[in-house]
Structure formats: structure tokens, C-alpha cells
Image (cartoon, rainbow, N blue to C red):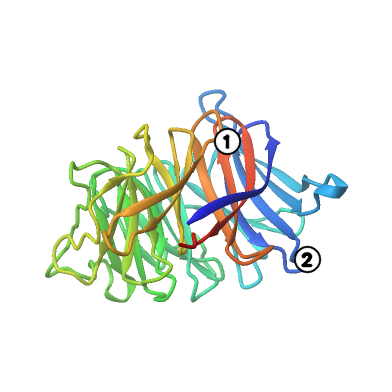
Amino acid sequence: MTMSNTFTDVMQIDSIAVTDKFNSIENDADIVVLAGLSSLEGNTWDGAIRFLSYKFNREKNCAFSEINSVSCNSGVTMVRFAGPQNELALSSHDDGCISIFSINGLLYVDSIHAHGDIASAISTNPMNCSQFISCGWDGAIFSWDWNSVDKNKPLMSISNAHYKHINDISFNPQHESIFCSGGQDGFIRMWDSRIGNNNIYTESAECVNIANNYQAVSCVEWSSSDPFVVLSGTDDGCIHAFDCRVEGRGDLFPAQKIHESGGRIRRICSSNVIFSASDDTTIAASTLHEHTENLTVLERIRKHSDYVTDLSVLYGITGHDTYTVISSSTDKTIHIEQLSFATNES
């Protein structure tokens, strides 16, 4: 496969950011982006959420523009669109709270006092738009429903889901009760909310450590092509793939260090191309080689000068086999780049 760069652009912001995105319903040539900010100043970091728009029209010199913004009392660790029409913004915070905002004006809707330490990640239920899960540095996982009369009462709670900090959590895109979590203890765990606080594979693999050297699991992502395969990134810069149907480890390919400097992988986005973001300031695009069962790196992109904190990838907005890659960084920028991959002809 070969890569071509269609365009690239960058927005300077005043704080470090984590991002989310979706393709605008009103205009397919626009992207709207949620950016969660942390100031890194003082004993308790304050933060903000910014709702941004990007127009694909370089001839008119259009780029990022701010639609709305709102200040927060603590730093934002993750922000995600939610609701049937992406009409809500969910944000997790350094003070352990989860906040809910209306996209229309970024108006405050509610707040949940979720965790006793940093709320590190959130994930919305793709099959039930009012439900989401959260995890935190307190080692706990909670399931919530913002339509509940008592929003501060979780639907499900797992108080000791991991031995240490939980770094990421992800709903299965095809099974509304199944999700996975990745922790500082080096484990990935698969859960099913239908059977309470029990692991879905309690008899064969209650805890599964997929890192060969017991590295902390920094992020998890379900494969876009197989609902039983989990991709994960670790603190040593490796990507793993785990098949949860296989008793024991179920590694689909050997752990591979995709990022040359070996920095922690912050985010993985899965499609027919796997994108990963790293503390080594790079974004890598890779694909699974059919014959060797190894990941082949298509391209490494270095557009940031510090840690890449989050990554979003849109496919096919402006053409077939075109990827729009949105990344945020502790260098206080949000970067957008459009890449195109094509198969080499022999």
C-alpha cells in the first residue's frame, strides 16, 4: 500500500487537549470536534470543553473555528459525543466527576460524582444511547444511565475491577452488555453486565494479561472487523491483539513495537487500517499482513512536538480509502490531516 497526503492543518489551543469527533449531519464537507482541555497549572488543574468546526475548503482559507466553549472546575481526561443524534457531550474529569453538556450552546445538564480518584475514561453504549460506562484511578468501573431519575446511582458497580489504576474502557460495538477494560496492572478484562460483577469468561480466563513483559495496558479498542477481538496498547509502545473466544491468552500476532521510540500508546483507532498515537509524538498507520500475521507499518506521522493525547479517525468523508485523522497533544495543538492509502499494483 502507498500513502498520499491530501492536506494538513493545525489549531493552536491554550491547554493540552483530548478530542472526539463526528461527521456533521448538516454538511458532509464539515467536521465538528469536541476538545477537552486541562490547564496543568495549580494544585487542581482546571479545564474547559471547546466545540470546534472544520471546513474542507482550502480555497477559501477555511480552517478550525470555535462554535462554543465552557469552563470546567477540573481538568478533562476524556470527552465524547453521546445521545441518539450526538446531541450531548460527556466528559470525565480529574476530580472523579462525569459531566453532561448539551451540544447546543454547551449548556450544563448534570454532573455525576462517579469516582474517588481521577475518572480516566468513559465509553458510550452503541446499542443503548442513554447508557455509558466509566473507569478511574480508584480501580472501579461503573455503568450509568443519564435518563435515570437518580443519575448518581449506577446501574452496575465493580469496585475492584483492577488491582491498580484503570486507564481505559470500551463498549463492544455489537454487544450492548459486553465491554473491556485495561489497567495499570497489565490486565485486559472482558465484562458482561448481564451477569453482575462477574467476568464473562470466569472459568477459562478471569484475568488475561496480554503483555509479554507485564507492561501496563494504556488503551483498549475493539476491532472494527471482529467483535471478539480486542486491540490494546501498552506503556512500552507495543500493540497487541487478543481473541477473547480463545481459552488463555489468544494472541493473534506477536506483540509489536509500532512506535520506534517505544513511548506509551495513548489511543488506537481500528478500521481496515489501524491508527495508533504515542507519547513519542508520532501517529502510526499499520495493517495486518495476511501472510506473516504481523502488523506492517504503512506510515509514521510526526506533526506534534510533545505527547499525542488522543486520536480520532474518520473514513471516507471526501473520497474512497481516505482517512481524516484528528489528534491532540500536550503541545497545545489539535492537528487534522487527510491521508489516502492505495494498493500498489505489480
Q: Nearer the viewer, mark 1 or mark 2?
A: 1
Question: Could you tell me residue 127's position as x and y percent?
Answer: 49, 76
The residue at the point 50 percent across, 38 percent down is 308
Give the amino acid at mark 2.
Asn
The residue at the point 26 percent across, 59 percent down is 292
**Is residue 295 visible to the viewer in this orientation of the structure?**
yes
Q: Which mark is residue 303?
A: 1
Label 1: which secondary element: loop
Give the amino acid at mark 1.
Lys
Label 2: which secondary element: loop
The residue at the point 72 percent across, 49 percent down is 52
Q: Which mark is residue 218?
A: none
Question: Could you tell me residue 23's position as x and y percent?
Answer: 67, 63
Judged from this view, the residue extending furthest toward the top is 42
Q: Residues within 10 Å of mark 2 (few under 14, many from 20)?
A: few
Q: Relative to the observer, which residue lies in front, 247 or 93? A: 247
Q: Earlier in the sequence, mark 1 or mark 2?
A: 2
Question: Could you tell me residue 41's position as x and y percent?
Answer: 57, 24
The residue labelled by disc 2 is: 27
